[in-house]
Amino acid sequence: MLPSRTPKVALVGRTNVGKSALFNRLVGRRKAIVEAVPGTTRDLISGIFEWAGRKIEIVDSGGLAAGDREDPEITEAIQRARTRLIKESDVILFVCDGKSSVLAPDEEIARALRHRTDDTLVIVNKVDHESQWATATAEFYRLGFQEVIPVSAAHGLGISVLCDKVVSLLPAQISGEPEETEDFSLAIIGEPNTGKSTYLNAILKSERATVSSIPGTTRDPVEDVLQMNGRKIRLMDTAGARRNRKVKESVAFYSQRRTLDTIEEADVLLLFFEAASGLSRNGLMLAEEVCRNHKSCVLVANKWDLVSGAEQGKYRAAFYEQFKFLSHCPLIFISAQNGKNIEKPLEEACRVWRAGNTRIEDRMLTETVTSIQKNTAFGERSRIKYATQVSVSPPHFVLFTNQASKIPENQLQAIRNALTVCLGLGGVFFKLSLRRGKKP
């Protein structure tokens, strides 16, 4: 028996009707950015909620008829993604604003969904009191759909009725289907306009994230699942990060906050930057966050085709010389736009993830460290007696020495560098601690 896929429910509607608020209510956390600014959501934001024993994927989309606020390039990309979402979804939640009448954009959406009347629910949001339900929903029946459900996403009213109706419209569940879990999560980070969303779409072979030439197009983290070489990887595209002094508006602030939260959540990070311009101050800020959180990382120099042949040969050595604290991270050159070498970052990410989750036997680790010590300029009295690994992801190694406080930082760095090479920990920001004593 083949396992069934997770059923998909789409949220569609014009701008500022509360789609993102309803999305956050269903998934149980503030995942999509909610602002009283039309067009805040641009990408397809997905999450999982459970109801009546069913796991359901809910996808929030950008508002239709965003108007003149959006650049035509962004508006066209949003419309393409939304059209594909409607086609792929099992149930459509057509969200309207209960505090206003039926507007022209609502009627436009209704015409686009006319072929889905059997599995489309009209959700009248912002109805904050049950006494208003009948009067608030009456006008929306003229959109031509049988089911009109009043809710208040802000206060949680009507949500249980909505969920019951959604489950009744879903395809039958196959009994005994196996529970699928991700092997690891992989986040794509970088400053704005470095090609992160282009790369995500290229890897997934679909227009999952909105792409334009305008910096800051991505606002919410965009997630999807990729099957690769028998592994299930949860991919997360993030908003381009800027230094705090450049983050002024609330939408940009929350986008940046989501990016930093994603760095903490992810198992492995792909740090994107433009090859021609190198790692900027914004990119360096992200690299510092990666180091501070001890996250495994792969460096991705995108738009490699724009670097001259003369510069390509000496690029790697010059980069590592400039950013010595990243010298243990693999550096991959790609062109996401042309599809060149785009599989390589994922292959390296799988290797780095395995390395960060490998537990090394104490005997092997101690022999490795003592061998390193013999080739390092240690003082006569400073000796490491024993080494052990106390955790994985990130790996944490504890070295027991007779004089822990007297080992200089440069000697510890020499040990870190040697351990990276000897244990194959390239790309892994592992922890290294010293304790005074012998074998515990």
Image (tube, helix red, strand yellow):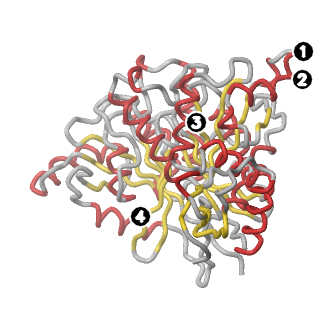
The numbered disc on residue 284 is none
Find disc 3 in the rendering and name its residue: 287
Give the total of numbered labels: 4
> What is the C-alpha distance between the residues marked 2 and 4?
57 Å
Which quadrant of the view contains residue 12? top left
The mark that comes first in sequence, 2 or 4, is: 4
Q: Secondary structure at mark 1?
A: helix
Q: Secondary structure at mark 4?
A: helix
Q: 342 above or below 115?
A: above
Find disc 4 in the rendering and name its residue: 166
Q: Quadrant of the C terminus?
A: bottom right
Mark 2, residues whose alpha carbon is within 10 Å: few (<14), some, or many (≥20)? few
Q: Look at label 3 and name its amino acid.
A: Ala
> What is the C-alpha distance between the residues marked 4 and 3?
43 Å
Labelled pair 4, 1 in contact (Cβ < 8 Å): no
Which quadrant of the view contains residue 343? top right
Say which of marks 4 and 1 sits in front. Answer: 1
Which quadrant of the view contains residue 5? bottom right
Q: Secondary structure at mark 2?
A: helix
Q: Look at label 2 and name its amino acid.
A: Gly
Q: Look at label 1 and name its amino acid.
A: Ala
Q: Position of residue 264 (x, y in %)?
A: 49, 50
Find disc 2 in the rendering and name its residue: 313
> What is the C-alpha distance between the residues marked 1 and 2?
6 Å
> What is the C-alpha distance between the residues marked 1 and 3?
27 Å
Q: Position of residue 373 (x, y in %)?
A: 75, 56
The mark that comes first in sequence, 2 or 3, is: 3
Labelled pair 1, 2 in contact (Cβ < 8 Å): yes
Find disc 1 in the rendering and name its residue: 310
